[in-house]
């Protein structure tokens, strides 16, 4: 009886590995981007999973799930963390000379930090007196990450074409406006 159980387990593991290999193979096939050009996801062994990796969509699903399940304060921290990680990814993609994917990744990083600023503004606007100090600390954290994002964007922006630079400029302008509003709210709450 034990031999049959072991054989069943061994068969299940082998079948699972087979399915995983087929999944990875089909993930490596060419796919169409929104610009009409074909690209392929790559499977490679590395410390980090970059957006050009075939397993990256799984990471995106996990990130989205964590974000949806998080409370308001935790969401702001996660958004800032995702922004920082995508800055790193965009730098790695630029090192691989993949400007198209690097631009998409960098613009997503700026969108994440802008969303963190926006949600932080909402928290401070609705804050009870007991939460004000906690939300101010969160705002300092978010603004520090925003400054890092803007420094990174300014440093690497010239590696993109004019259209890419215009996208980054537009997102950065939106972020600067949100950051100014958050600073203003922080100053008002400190004075009160």
Image: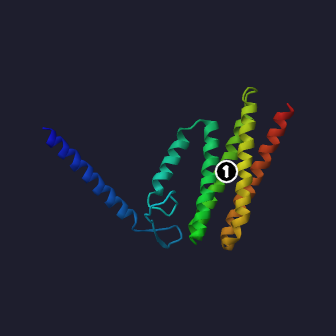
* Picture colour scheme: rainbow
Q: How far from the left and from the top, in percent, is residue 13? A: 27, 49
Instruction: Give the residue drawn at x 50%, y 64%.
Output: 52
Give coordinates of residue 70: x percent, y percent: 56, 38
Q: Residue 10 vs residue 181: left or right?
A: left
Which residue extends farthest front?
Answer: 3
Give the SS element for disc 1: helix
- 151 to 139, vertically: above or below: below
- Tell me residue 161's x, y (percent): 66, 73
Vertical placement of 7 versus 35: above or below? above
Most distant residue in the left direction: 1
The residue depicted at 59 percent of the width and 35 percent of the height is: 71
Q: Name the residue beneath numbered marker 1.
A: 113
Q: In which quadrant will I find the C terminus?
A: top right
In the image, 55: left or right of 158? Answer: left
Identify which residue is drawn at 72% across, 29% down.
131
Mark 1 crowd level (few <14, some 14–19, many ≥20, 10 Å Cα) = many
Query: Left or right: where does residue 33 sit relative to residue 113?
Result: left
Q: Position of residue 183 (x, y in %)?
A: 80, 44
Q: Nearer the viewer, residue 53 or 76?
A: 53
Foreground residue, 154 or 168?
154
Instruction: Left or right? Give the position of 70 relative to 10.
Output: right
């Amino acid at each position: 009886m034990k031999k049959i159980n072991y054989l069943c387990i061994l068969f299940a593991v082998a079948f699972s590995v087979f399915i995983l290999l087929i999944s990875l193979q089909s993930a490596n096939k060419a796919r169409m981007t929104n610009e009409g050009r074909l690209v392929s996801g790559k499977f490679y062994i590395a410390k980090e999973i970059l957006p050009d990796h075939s397993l990256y969509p799984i990471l995106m699903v996990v990130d989205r799930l964590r974000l949806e399940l998080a409370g308001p304060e935790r969401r702001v921290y996660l958004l800032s963390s995702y922004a920082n990680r995508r800055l790193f990814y965009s730098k790695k993609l630029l090192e691989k000379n993949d400007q198209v994917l690097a631009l998409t990744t960098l613009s997503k990083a700026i969108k994440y930090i802008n969303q963190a600023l926006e949600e932080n503004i909402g928290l401070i606007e609705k804050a009870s007196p007991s939460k004000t100090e906690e939300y101010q600390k969160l705002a300092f954290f978010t603004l520090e990450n925003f400054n890092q994002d803007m420094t990174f964007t300014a440093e690497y922006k010239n590696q993109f074409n004019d259209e890419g630079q215009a996208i980054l400029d537009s997102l950065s302008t939106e972020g600067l406006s949100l950051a100014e509003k958050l600073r203003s709210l922080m100053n008002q709450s400190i004075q009160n």
